[in-house]
Amino acid sequence: MRVITGTARGHRLIAPEGMDVRPTTDKVKEAVFSAVQFELENASVLDLFAGSGQMGIEALSRGAAKAVFVDSSAKSIKCVNENLRATKLDKYSQVVSRDSYDYIKLTSSKFDLIILDPPYRQGHIEKLLPLAAEKLNDGGSIICEYESELETPEAPEGTVFRKEYRYGKINVAIFRKPVSEEE
């Protein structure tokens, strides 16, 4: 697992040991970030169920201004912090040891990019997508990774379905919040 491109290009990242974390493959990560590459400059990013932090780190490496990494696992938090220090991206980051549901419900922050990659087969996507949509800035996107046997999640209120990618046992859907017409 490595950072694909940007300021931290080529840095190897560590992941927590065990079956609790399922790192996104480089192939999937590259496709996802190709789809949102023009939205990353100066973006604020939320990486829920951060695991190793690789998705938020990739966003920072590609020009995002700041990222918040949320995970309830002490092992994951330790890995995220180590990976941020190794890539020298820690000064643009906030690492939060907290349940992702609690964080998304209680934060007053809004984000340009929200990454949802929760544990599979636990029904998190359906519950989290509407909450994430409420914390999305106009023009922002939600990247949602889930198991391929599930149907594509419905676009939460206030967003539109943008694209879906299928890679073997992994699907990724991207939802976007349109820019308000009233501006």
Image: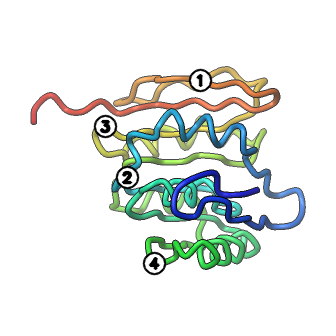
Q: Marks 3/4: CA distance?
A: 25 Å
Q: Earlier in the sequence, mark 2 or mark 4?
A: 4
Q: CA distance from mark 1 to mark 4?
A: 33 Å
- The structure residue drawn at horizontal position 49% and vertical position 60%, both measured from the top left corner, is 60
The numbered mark, 3 or 2, whose residue comes first in the sequence reads 2
| Marks 2, 4: nearer the viewer | 4
| First in sequence: mark 1 vs mark 2 | 2
Tell me which numbered mark, 3 or 1, is placed earlier along the sequence: 3
Q: Mark 1–mark 4 contact, CB under 8 Å?
A: no
Earlier-in-chain disc, 1 versus 4? 4
Q: Secondary structure at mark 3?
A: strand
Answer with left or right where residue 125 lies relative to residue 142.
right
Using the image as rendered, state which of residue 54 and residue 12 is in the foreground: 12
Tell me: 145 left or right of 46: right
Q: What is the three-letter code of the residue carrying label 1?
A: Glu
Label 1, secondary structure: give it.
Answer: strand
Label 2 neighbourhood size at 10 Å, few (<14), some (14-19), many (20+)?
Answer: many
Residue 131: x, y in percent? 46, 45
Comparing 58 with 183, the one in front is 58
Q: What is the x, y in percent for residue 156?
A: 45, 30
Which amino acid lies under the numbered mark 4 shown in the image of this protein?
A: Lys
Residue 164 disc label: 1
Label 4 sits on residue: 91
For mark 2, give the secondary structure: strand
